Image: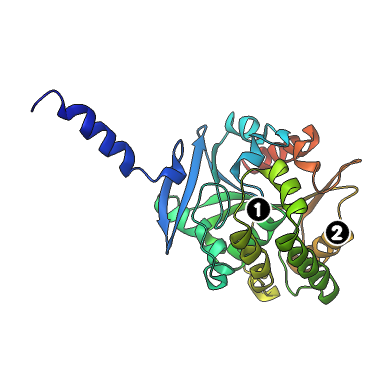
Amino acid sequence: MRDWMWPVLVLAAFLSIPRSCLGQNSFDSGKVKICYAEAGEGEPVVLIHGWMADSTMWGKGRLGDSKVTDTLAKKFRVITLDCHGHGKSGKPHDPKDYGPEMAKDVVRLLDHLKIDKAHLVGYSMGAILAGWVVATHPDRVLSVTFAGGAPVLEPDPEDQKKNDEFVEKWEKDKGLQAVSGLLFGEQDVKALAAANRSLKDIKVTQAGLEKYSGPVLFVYGEDDWPSTKRYVTVAKKALGRGEVKVIPKADHLSTPSRPEFREAILKFLQAQKGE
C-alpha cells in the first residue's frame, strides 16, 4: 500500500464515526442513535437526565460539577446516556418518535450492553422514564431512585396546562432560548419541545408499579416545585413504600449539585449491596 493512502484511510475512518457521538459510545435505538458513556466497575447504575439537560448533568456540566458520576463510579459501573432529542443523541422532530420511545431507550441500552438488571437513577424527566421501565420491565431493575420527580399515573391538568404554556412561549422567545442555551448548551428547540410534550404519554398504572418489588428512593429539594412533591406522594402511595430524602434549601435546578444529593444516592445503592 502506498504511503500517501494511510492518511486518507485514517481520515475516512474518522469521518465514518457518528460526529454527534465523538468521545462517547453509541448504539441504534429504534430509529434514533443514542450516545452513552461508562465509568467505574461493579453493579451497573444507569443515570437518566432531565429535560433540556444531558448526561453531563451528572458530572462537569454547565451548571457546575455535580460529581455524581465520579462518586458512584468508585463503587459501581456507571452508565450515562443522552436521551432522545438531547445532548449528542439523535434529534427527530416528529412527536411520534418520543413518548415511551424515550423510556425504551433505557431498556435497549441494557440489551445493547448485555446487562440483565441495573440500578436506575432518574432526575425530573428521567424519573418519569425510570418509572415507565419499572412498571413495564420490573425484572430489569435492581433498585430505582426517583430524583426531582416520580412516575406519573395521571398528569394533573393544571400542571399540564402551565407546562404547555411555558413550552409554547419558550419555542417563540429567543431570549428564553438564549438563557436555556447558557444553562444547558446547544439545543434543538423543535426536538426538545416534542420531547417535553410527549411526557404526558409516559404514564404508568398502579398495577404496573405493584409488579416491581425492589428498593425505592425518592430524592428532591426542599424548595422544589409543589407539583414534584405531589407526584412523589402519589407514586409512593401507589408503590406502597419508598425511602424519602429531602435536600435542605435546594430547588429543582440546584438539587443535583448538592453534596447531600450524591451522598444520599450512594448510601442507598450501597445498602442494596449490604455495605
Q: Is residue 178 visible?
A: yes
Quadrant holding the C terminus: top right
In which image quadrant can residue 64 be found? top right
| Residue 128 on image: x %, y % | 68, 61
Question: Taking 162 as reference, is 71 left or right?
Answer: left
Query: Viewer-nearest of labels 2 and 1?
Result: 2
The crowd level at tag 2 (other Cα within 10 Å; few <14, some 14-19, many 20+) is: many
**What residue sits 89% from the left and 60% below the top?**
226
Q: How is the image coloured?
A: rainbow
Q: Is residue 140 above or below residue 45?
A: below
| Residue 114 on image: x %, y % | 40, 50
What amino acid is labelled 2 in the image?
A: Lys
Q: Disc 2 or 1, which lies upstream in sequence?
A: 1
| Residue 139 on image: x %, y % | 53, 61
Tell me, yes or no, whether the two marked residues, 2 and 1, touch with CB atoms within 8 Å: no
Question: Taking 260 as reference, is 139 left or right?
Answer: left
Q: Is residue 224 above or below residue 72?
A: below
Q: Is residue 212 visible?
A: no
The disc at residue 229 is: 2
| Residue 77 on image: x %, y % | 52, 37
- The residue where tag 1 is placed is 144
The crowd level at tag 1 (other Cα within 10 Å; few <14, some 14-19, many 20+) is: many
Point out the residue furthest to the left here: 1
- Circle 1 SS class: strand
What amino acid is labelled 1 in the image?
A: Val
Nearer-the-camera pick, 20 or 205: 20
**What residue sits 77% from the left and 53% below the top?**
176
Give the distance between the C-alpha atoms of the residues marked 2 and 1, in whole angstroms. Answer: 17 Å
The disc at residue 63 is: none
- Circle 2 SS class: helix
Quadrant holding the N terminus: top left
